[in-house]
Image (cartoon, rainbow, N blue to C red):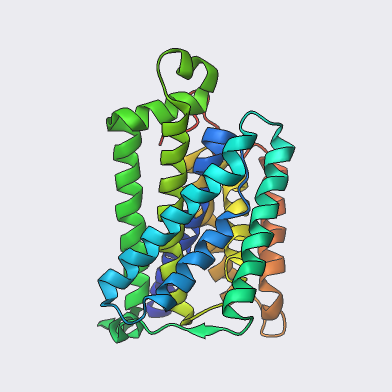
Amino acid sequence: MTTFLQHCIDAISLGSLYALLALGIALIFGIMRLLNFAHGELITIGGYSLWLFRDLPALLQIAAAVAVVVIAALIIERIAFRPLRGADGAVLLVSSFAVSFLLQSLAIVVFGSRAKGVALPDWLSSNVNVGSLRIPVISIVTVASAAVLLSALGYFFNRTPMGVQMRAAAENFGTARLVGVRADSVITTAFAISALLAGIAGFLLVAQGGTVTANMGTAPVLIAFVATIIGGLGSLTGAVYGGYFLGVVTVVLQVALPLSLRPYRDAFVYLAVIFVLLLRPQGIIVLRTSLLRA
């Protein structure tokens, strides 16, 4: 039973991280119908910002890193995506690829290809003992962060004027603009929220690994896309479910696979994803009304 509970904690923690990653992708797609591959580089920017602000107190370090990510996302939206607004989806997709490769190459030029060690508070790497269970503090922080952010987003989209405008824009942008919804405000807010999620996810990833590299956002953003597709493109609730589904499947395979096959765990994860999509190609959740209804 102790081992089972330990695996459940691992699955919930990993699923919470994946849910945060998927939410950032789903939010931008819901508003702009854009699969933003540059989202991974926002995670990388957050990681390098933590390294640059390593001399600050921990809370200021994290806050400054998240602020840098949000500012970077707003600059990217203004330069790379706003001039292409209204263009074909393929054009926006190519633009996001270009931004991703540009930022990744720029990170290598500026910081080098070698990993940078990031010093975070020692208590993040400690454990909390509950009976015979040993719960990593970083797992508690991950689950708590996801719970707070999910609750805040649910309130924002359902109870605030801007949240309602974003839901209206996701359902029909043209009609929403006719009744007074400002496109620039809605899209800018969406990018800022997506960047906030990327910044928090970047901090959690760095806290787990202790290092930052120029391509650290590549694997997480792939996981985010997969979780978003599993949950149903455009559905924030589906993105959350997709993230937790991937977290559970990953931990189950890590435990169930023989030692000789564990290096191929991710291949089996994607095989499970293919199986799910064959059974339900439209995703776990498909909303008939607002794409952003939580």
Foreground of the two, 97 or 128: 97
What is the count of numbered marks? 0
Residue at the spot x=33%, y=68% of the render?
62
Residue at the spot x=53%, y=67% of the render?
44
Give residue 281's position: percent from left, percent from top.
Answer: 68, 40
Foreground of the two, 37 or 264: 37
The N terminus: image quadrant: bottom left
Give residue 200's position: percent from left, percent from top.
Answer: 40, 62
Residue at the spot x=64%, y=54% of the render?
99
The answer to whether residue 24 is left or right of residue 269 is left
Q: In which quarter of the image is residue 64?
A: bottom left
The answer to whether residue 259 is left or right of residue 287 is right
Give residue 75's position: percent from left, percent from top.
Answer: 50, 49
The C terminus: image quadrant: top left
The answer to whether residue 26 is left or right of residue 135 is right
Is residue 172 something one can see in this rendering?
A: no
Foreground of the two, 93 or 30: 93
Is residue 212 something one can see in this rendering?
A: yes
Give residue 192's position: percent from left, percent from top.
Answer: 42, 47
Foreground of the two, 233 or 184: 184
In the image, is residue 16 above or below residue 140? above
In the image, is residue 185 above or below residue 207? above
Q: Quadrant of residue 220?
A: bottom right
